[in-house]
Amino acid sequence: MTIHEIIKENRISRSLTQETLAEQINVTPQAVSRWETGGSLS
């Protein structure tokens, strides 16, 4: 399992949207989307 799969799986298991997760960790929803698709992790 890759890091982007782990991020997405954990977000879904907690019933969070990308927007909600982004708000909680103070990043943009686009950053969460990139993480989940295997894009840049920075």
Image: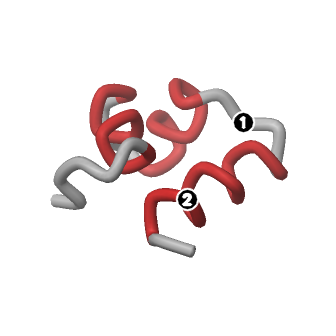
Q: Earlier in the sequence, mark 1 or mark 2?
A: 2
Left or right side of 30 for 20: right
| Amino acid type indicated by mark 1 | Leu
Q: Quadrant of residue 1?
A: bottom right
The numbered dot on residue 5 is 2
Please state the horizontal and vertical placement of residue 22, each as a whole percent of the image. Answer: 45, 37
Q: Which of the two marks, 1 or 2, is nearer to us in this view?
A: 2
Which numbered disc covers residue 16?
Answer: 1
Return the residue found at the far front: 1
Residue 29 to residue 40: above or below? above
Vertical order, 30 against 8 (above or below):
above
Q: Quadrant of the C terminus?
A: bottom left
Which secondary structure, mark 2? helix
Q: Is residue 1 above or below residue 31?
A: below
Q: Residue at image x 65%, y 28%? A: 17
The amino acid at mark 2 is Glu
Q: Residue at x 81, y 49 (%)?
A: 14
Give the camera-side residue of 38 and 30. Answer: 38
Which residue appears at 75% of the width and 43% of the height?
12
